[in-house]
Image: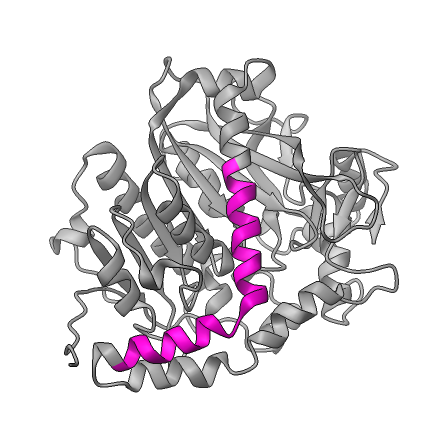
Amino acid sequence: MVVPRAVKALSAIASLATAQEPPFTLPTPTGRAAVGTTSWVLADSTRRESFSNSGAARSVEVVAWYPTNASPSASSRAPYLREGVVEAATFATAMRKPGAFDHLAAVETHSSIDAPPSGRSKSLPVLVFSHGYTGLVSAYTALLEDLASHGYIVLSVAHSYEAVAVRQSDGSVATMLDSAGSMRPGILDVFGEWRDEDSTMARVTRAKTESEQLRILKTYIDGVPKTNAVIDRWVADTKFALDQFARASGGIAGELNRRADLDRIGVLGHSMGGVVAGEFCLRDTRCRAGLNLDGIPQSGSMIASRMKRPFMMVYSARPGRLGASDVIYRRAASRYFRVDVDDTRHVDFSDMIFWGGPLKAAGASGSIAPNRAVELTRLIVRQYFDQELQGVPSPLLAGTLRLPDAHVRKPTLTRGP
């Protein structure tokens, strides 16, 4: 389903929001800088879009957050749903709960749209983010705004047709649903490969030796070729987005490029996006440090490779999964960091912990308070990248900051024969 942009997202959202109360308030960014945001769409002429028969080039949208000196006003405040109500409507349709999330249009961000960036030339480190599989780009606003308020340029890469809604180079919005409102067949093929994931990860975490864990994981990873193809596709999207950003000269993208320190690039993501962060850091030496928010297992080629970069894994408390990818990261990363967050589930590292409604009824979130989940996610991510990209030691990782609900682990495994 490709939805024409008949009206601009700002005016469409504003008209709907006037009739509704915001279902929640995004936590205020904790950094000193005000936050600006913008977006642009790129067309990769070297690749054809595999989800379309049109022969069109692959489109990659980038949504950027960055420090600015401009304070948000009613007229400049960026919408929460960056592609409009189609994001909420598509997600609700996929859950078979039409209209359940339309009220997200009333949520306010803390960012000024298209504000001029602040910062000196080549002074700002860059973070590149990827969403979860069939996720919403907008659902990570609380984390990405916060990182920008602490002086990072954040480039969120939107992966066409495998996200809820992504703007295309022709101005349309491509969604994860087909013309009948059903999940696209290619996506269903990927989901089909994950049928035994829970039981397989439980076997990994019960295994007594490193060699046994590797054997189970390798068999699983070799058996999910469509998932590995997604990783290849998303790594290519990320590389293309970063290549083009490094060449940008005009508009706000060009201004951001002139302020960006491209020798200090970190890559992170949630779920599939976290797995892609690991694979990107393996393949592209521009990555100085990577981080995965609960993407399990680390599929792709890292299981048999060394990436010579530090990496952090943040695990939720999903049963049977704690430590499932440790054996891969301990062997591949130059330094491996692990943090476990109590009382969480998979979506709790995103804004979706605030959404309630059908998500809450389905048990998608853990028992952790939403504001606490955001606070912990922000702190863990920021301290890690501050340490690895800016040389500021992390009190959490050093053990001088101890939290009752987030635990730094040093995995120890018994090596097999």
Location of residue 44 (image quadrant): top right
Q: Report if residue 218 is visible in the image.
A: yes
Give the main secondary structure, helix, strand or loop, of the magenta stretch: helix
Pinpoint residue 357: horizontal percent, then vertical percent: 65, 69
Q: Is residue 62 depicted above or below 123 in this figure?
A: below
Left or right, residue 18 beside residue 262:
right
**Residue at the image point whose x is 76% and y is 48% from the top:** 174
Report if residue 3 lies within the magenta region.
no
In this rendering, position of residue 113 left or right of residue 372: right
Q: Residue at x 26, y 57 (%)?
A: 332
Side of 395 where 280 appears, left or right: right
Is 226 one of the magenta-colored residues?
yes
Q: Residue at x 47, y 29 (%)?
A: 66
Q: Position of residue 313 (x, y in %)?
A: 32, 59
Quadrant of the snapshot with the N terminus:
bottom right
Question: Can residue 25 be seen?
Answer: no
User: Which range of residues does the magenta coloring cover?
Assistant: 212-239
Residue 67, percent from left and from top? 44, 26
Q: Position of residue 55 (x, y in %)?
A: 80, 42
Q: Point out the image quarter for the C terminus.
A: bottom left
* Viewer-closest of 31 and 123: 123
* Quadrant in the picture for residue 75: top right
Q: Nearer the viewer, residue 129 or 204?
A: 204
